[in-house]
Amino acid sequence: MKLVEVLGTGCAKCVKTAESIERVASELGVDVKVVKETDPARIMEYQVMSTPGVAVDGKVVHSGSIPHREQIVSWLQG
């Protein structure tokens, strides 16, 4: 199971990012746990300055925009 953290304050883009990741994972049959991390201190630990940010298994893979489907697929299958 992959742990995917969506880093952000809960804005619309952050919510959409989490929903997109959950949808793509379901379509691919990949077992993921999506966590919405809203604590500013925790987000800063990842050094993410622009949200939404995405961390997969503890590694930041994206920040600053809603990721495209192709990016999500590569994270989940990688």
Image (tube, rainbow, N blue to C red):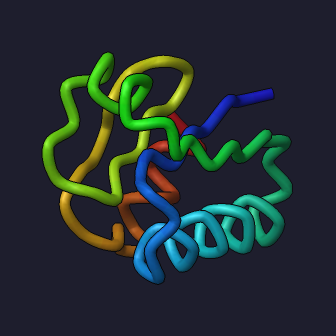
Q: Residue at x 50, y 31 (%)?
A: 56
Image position, residue 10 (x, y; %): 52, 65
Q: Is residue 12 above or below residue 70?
A: below
Image position, residue 15 (x, y; %): 57, 73
Q: Residue at x 44, y 49 (%)?
A: 74
Q: Is residue 25 above or below residue 2?
A: below
Q: Quadrant of the N terminus?
A: top right
Residue closer to the observer: 24 or 7: 7
Residue closer to the observer: 56 or 29: 56
Question: Farthest residue toward the left?
Answer: 49
Image position, residue 52 (x, y; %): 34, 59
Q: Is residue 41 left or right of residue 73?
A: left
Q: How many marks?
A: 0
Q: Is residue 45 left or right of residue 20?
A: left
Place residue 31 in its image quadrant.
top right
Image position, residue 3 (x, y; %): 67, 30
Residue closer to the observer: 37 or 56: 37
Place residue 32 in its image quadrant.
top right
Q: Residue at x 70, y 30 (%)?
A: 2
